[in-house]
Amino acid sequence: MPELPEVETIVRGLRENTVGNRIESLTELRNNTIIYHTNQCAEGLVFSSLSRRGKYILINLSDILTMVIHLRMTGKLVYTETEQLTPHTRAVIKFADRTMLQFEDIRTFGSIQIFEANDTDPAIKRLGPEPLTEDFNEKYLYKVLEKAKAPIKSILLNQEIIAGLGNIYVCEILYRTKIHPTLAGKELTRADIIRVITATKEVLAEAILHNGTSISDFRNIDDKPGEFQNFLRVYQKKECPLGHPTERIKIAGRSTYFCPVCQRLK
Ligand SMILES: [Zn+2]
């Protein structure tokens, strides 16, 4: 599932290639892929600017509409000059310059939503702070964790607490902080909290630098894989970088990798 660094990589690729492109047609190849929350149609409008919020891609269309793309589990965007439809192509945006953006989605959980410019997905309004901004700081995280009984792993995965983290990066962040993933939020010390904030920002920045992680099927819009899978320390690893055998447990149904030596329970 694409997490913050993968979505950021896609947004940067799209920004480089599609800003200024006029939408000639927007075609849905599978029902309920493109969802309109307005009567205004997107044809004829221009990709004016692109941004990311959590794992959502936001495209400003001529300051009139906002296109919100959520890739969910398996969604993928392919920017191409020649139509390359696959059995999983759910929608195609054709631009006036003959290039196109294809939306592929094997599991079909992803979507393209169209809102008025001043409106957006209610789920986006509920997102917690962006981890790479100043809003994600010691004071904020201390307040969130103060009374939290849930495991730190689940808390960091909660999009309403911090936007954009998923299973891979939370495993990596906790490994770097030496915190056991089942430790209750309220058990973290001030020093732990500072370590979580620092490790979060570091892991995400490094992953963006390496164009994301391609463990399953993540591809950039030019179909190139990311490289950060080569730098993972614990996720899907048999040993941590110090040679200790890792363990895998389920927390809230998600496979959690950690090192029982480096990340001892207090
Ligand atoms: Zn270890």
Image: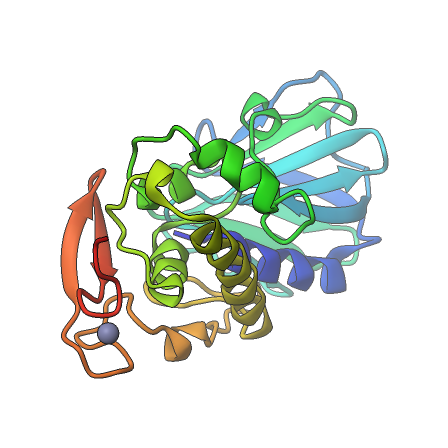
Where residue 25 sits, quadrant-wise, is top right
Of residue 44 and residue 260, the one placed in the foreground of this image is 260
Asked if 254 appears above or below 234 in the picture, the reply is: above
Of residue 101 and residue 161, the one placed in the foreground of this image is 161
| Residue depicted at x 43% and y 36% | 145
Q: Residue lying furthest top in this view? A: 39
In which quadrant of this rendering is ligand 1 seen?
bottom left
Of residue 87 and residue 246, the one placed in the foreground of this image is 246
Asked if 160 appears above or below 247 in the picture, the reply is: above
Q: In the visual, does 88 lie left or right of 18? A: left
Would you say residue 108 is visible in this rendering?
no
Asked if 39 appears above or below 153 in the picture, the reply is: above
In this picture the colour scheme is: rainbow
| Residue depicted at x 71% and y 16% | 39
| Residue depicted at x 56% and y 60% | 201
Where residue 157 sits, quadrant-wise, is top left
Expressed as whole percent of the image width and height from the top left, the position of residue 132 reads: 63, 54
Of residue 42 and residue 191, the one placed in the foreground of this image is 191
Expressed as whole percent of the image width and height from the top left, the position of residue 97 reads: 78, 58
| Residue depicted at x 65% and y 47% | 52
Numbered circles on residues, count = 0
Where residue 54 sits, quadrant-wise, is top right
Expressed as whole percent of the image width and height from the top left, the position of residue 155 reads: 38, 38
